[in-house]
Image: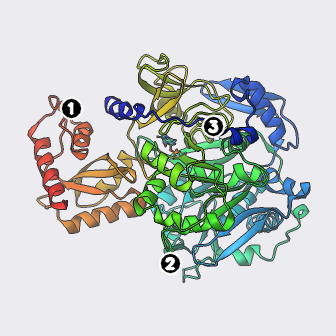
């Protein structure tokens, strides 16, 4: 905590203030008394008005700590709310997605009516394969139209799913398939990545070979890359789906209970094994659609772009379910921001006259590094609101975002939330909040956030940093960890008896505004992606040459944090540049390329306490190039000095 506090002191010196623009405020979705509402009245009203129920709920919530239930007794279907009802309400011609493929000119406007046809055909195809209410399905795809179509079709059938980010390895994918007990996998041949095809199906094949419950695999042809199809198990999407009926009545939406499991999203925790975060149906949908409406000030004509990947919670909540529930027109982009050139995003914004852009600080900092000239080539005057998510945003990036991308006029909403929270929790609303670069400002109505001290008392506003906690349940709150009640209670509910422990440090200033300071546990945040130190350590020691590994993160000007690994090799092997590449690739293979360490330092031994624990704190000091902290509990203090000398020598070589 001490170290995070040093950073926050610098941040709190930030004195720029941006009150809402009166013209914007006058047209904003938020009423003047937005923050004065009674939470239960607010969520009751949003639940009744934002969702079309097959059967209305009779009880708003039930709180049996640590388990919450919301909208009890209600029956609904997410796909009906996101697609069918908009077509029935005469919005069939409205564009749901301006889909933009990576290859230039590969574009598709998908209206709500088109989306319904595609979803109904897919759902009929899935049914033919044997997928029905309660069947568990894994989805492993990139940003292609079939990704949202698949999720909506599964929602239509009432089949719970887990969507695995396309950058994960066979081991990571297989682990999730087995943990959830998935019987089906839906994937694609390969994904477009900077002009080349990056194969997904071979990774899926390897994952499936270790997943005994898996019955069949459906494959979308995206790139035409040659892949193996296993007879009797694998089928092409176009063979199964294309010939199906697209008449909505041929595949009615299943009636689901408010509390039926909707999906699992696996996320890194503080141990090696990712945890299956459980989201249910009605609370999740209400939470994401409500926050989407107010935080981004969504109007019927808004063109909105969340430039995340559907494989993360941000994509689930704010590319698929929130925006579609609100009948919003979104942009969805398949590729990378620098293909074919570094102005691709700005070209897309100009073409579709995008009003809202939602992205991560890492992307903003990357664009800053590339230079303003790429944005200046394009007319970005359509932008009205800019959003940030996934990591703390430094004031410099915040101001660059507002000035260079937003023309010095757009509000920037820094939204703090987590896979566990399902929805945005602490955020400005652009028509009401005075913005401060670097602060996520205010809890959303009905979110009871606080910073607790060590004793579990709320730290008074303006007087120090503490543990970010939430004291009352909220609708999109996760309903536990899949098949792991013990870990759920231990991770989130054991530190304080009366509050959810988020795992972040936070400070509340004199105005009651929140400043999030990053993780205070063994979770790293690299480019807005969550990874656990122990997961990366396990991947390293899985290599036959590695005896021991310790992983920490250091600050990085672009990616927020970067991974540094300290490794001892077996026998008398010496580290070498080739070994370094080999180990990085190995981590990439075990977890996925996002987990590759930025640096690997080879050491003869790692600093251990007398009780045999690796002293990560000291390694972090080395990684951050700081003076070494207290070494008195070390078994052999010379070890860490030796590592520091090696790390310094490496660093001077790089200079
Ligand atoms: C971090 C992503 C500071 C935080 C939606 C949290 C943030 C973790 C912010 C969750 C923000 C997310 N300011 N930190 N605006 N948003 N974080 O589960 O450490 O992938 O605990 O969810 O990201 O990451 P996750």
Q: Earlier in the sequence, mark 1 or mark 3?
A: 3
- Whether pointer 1 and pointer 2 mark residues with C-beta atoms closer than 8 Å, the reply is no
| Distance from Cα at disc 1 to Cα at disc 2 | 52 Å
Q: Give the residue displayed 23% in from the left and 40% down from the top.
A: 621
What label sits on residue 521 in the rendered view?
none
What label sits on residue 611 in the rendered view?
1
Nearest the eye: 355 or 318:
355
What label sits on residue 20 in the rendered view?
3
In the image, is 616 to the left or to the right of 383? left
- Is the residue at mark 3 in contact range of ligand 1, meaning its CB lies under 8 Å from it? no
| Distance from Cα at disc 1 to Cα at disc 3 | 55 Å
Q: Earlier in the sequence, mark 1 or mark 2?
A: 2
Q: Is residue 502 in sight in this rendering?
A: no
Nearest the eye: 633 or 561:
561
Tell me residue 297's x, y (percent): 70, 44
- Whether pointer 1 and pointer 3 mark residues with C-beta atoms closer than 8 Å, the reply is no
Tell me residue 178's x, y (percent): 54, 55
In the image, is 100 to the left or to the right of 240? left
Q: Is residue 422 in sight in this rendering?
A: yes
Nearest the eye: 132 or 421:
421
Q: The residue tagged with tag 3: helix, strand or loop? A: loop
In the image, is 136 to the left or to the right of 534? right
Nearest the eye: 620 or 23:
23
Tag in front: 3 or 2: 3
Q: Give the residue displayed 81% in from the left and 32% down from the top.
A: 45
Residue under label 2: 195
Tell me residue 580's x, y (percent): 24, 63
Q: Give the residue displayed 80% in from the left and 48% down from the top.
A: 77
């Amino acid at each position: 905590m001490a170290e995070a506090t040093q950073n926050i002191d610098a941040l709190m010196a930030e004195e720029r203030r941006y009150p809402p623009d009166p013209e914007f405020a006058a047209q904003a979705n938020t009423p003047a008394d937005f923050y004065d509402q009674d939470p239960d009245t607010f969520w009751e009203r949003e639940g009744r008005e934002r969702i079309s129920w097959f059967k209305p709920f009779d009880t708003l919530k039930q709180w049996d700590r640590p388990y919450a239930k919301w909208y009890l007794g209600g029956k609904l279907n997410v796909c009906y709310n996101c697609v069918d009802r908009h077509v029935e309400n005469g919005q069939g011609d409205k564009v749901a997605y301006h889909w933009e493929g990576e290859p230039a000119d590969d574009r598709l406007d998908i209206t709500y009516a088109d989306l319904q046809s595609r979803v109904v055909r897919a759902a009929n195809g899935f049914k033919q394969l044997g997928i029905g209410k309660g069947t568990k399905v894994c989805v492993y795809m990139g940003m292609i139209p079939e990704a949202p179509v698949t999720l909506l079709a599964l929602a239509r059938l009432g089949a719970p799913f887990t969507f695995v980010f396309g950058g994960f390895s066979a081991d990571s994918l297989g682990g999730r398939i087995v943990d959830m007990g998935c019987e089906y996998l839906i994937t694609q041949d390969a994904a477009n990545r900077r002009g080349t095809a990056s194969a997904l199906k071979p990774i899926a094949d390897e994952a499936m070979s270790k997943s005994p419950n898996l019955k069949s695999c459906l494959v979308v042809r995206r790139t035409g890359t040659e892949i193996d199809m296993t007879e009797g198990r694998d089928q092409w999407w176009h063979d199964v789906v294309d010939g199906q009926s697209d008449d909505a009545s041929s595949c009615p939406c299943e009636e689901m209970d408010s509390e039926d499991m909707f999906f699992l999203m696996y996320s890194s925790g503080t141990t090696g094994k990712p945890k299956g975060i459980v989201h249910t149906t009605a609370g999740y949908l209400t939470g994401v659609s409500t926050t989407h409406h107010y935080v981004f000030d969504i109007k019927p004509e808004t063109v909105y772009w969340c430039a995340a990947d559907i494989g993360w919670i941000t994509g689930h909540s704010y590319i698929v379910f929130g925006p579609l529930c609100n009948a919003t027109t979104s942009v969805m982009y398949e590729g990378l921001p620098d293909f074919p050139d570094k102005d691709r995003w700005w070209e897309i914004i100009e073409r579709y006259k995008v009003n809202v852009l939602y992205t991560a600080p890492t992307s903003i900092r990357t664009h800053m590094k590339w230079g303003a000239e790429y944005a200046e080539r394009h007319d970005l005057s359509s932008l009205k609101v800019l959003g940030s998510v996934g990591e703390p945003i430094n004031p410099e990036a915040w101001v660059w975002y507002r000035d260079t991308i937003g023309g010095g006029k757009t509000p920037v909403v820094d939204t703090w939330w987590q896979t566990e929270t399902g929805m945005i929790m602490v955020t400005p609303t652009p028509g009401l909040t005075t913005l401060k670069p670097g602060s996520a400002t205010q809890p959303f109505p009905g979110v009871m956030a606080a910073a607790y001290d060590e004793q579990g008392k709320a730290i008074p506003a303006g007087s120090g940093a503490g543990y970010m906690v939430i004291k009352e349940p909220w609708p999109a709150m996760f309903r536990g960890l899949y098949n792991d009640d013990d870990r759920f209670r231990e991770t989130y509910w054991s530190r304080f008896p009366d509050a959810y422990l988020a795992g972040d440090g936070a400070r509340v200033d004199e105005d009651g505004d929140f400043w999030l300071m990053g993780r205070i546990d063994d979770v790293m945040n690299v480019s807005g992606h969550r990874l656990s130190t122990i997961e990366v350590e396990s991947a390293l020691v899985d290599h036959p040459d590695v005896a021991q590994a310790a992983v920490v993160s250091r600050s990085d000007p672009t990616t927020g944090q970067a991974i540094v690994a300290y490794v001892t090799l077996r026998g008398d092997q010496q580290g070498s540049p080739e070994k370094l590449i080999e180990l990085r690739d190995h981590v990439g293979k075990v977890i996925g390329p996002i987990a590759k360490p930025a640096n690997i330092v080879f050491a003869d031994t790692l600093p251990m306490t007398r009780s045999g624990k690796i002293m990560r704190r000291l390694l972090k000091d080395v990684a951050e190039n700081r003076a070494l902290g207290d070494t008195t509990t070390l078994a052999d203090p010379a070890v860490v000095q030796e590592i520091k000398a090696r790390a310094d020598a490496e660093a001077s070589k790089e200079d």
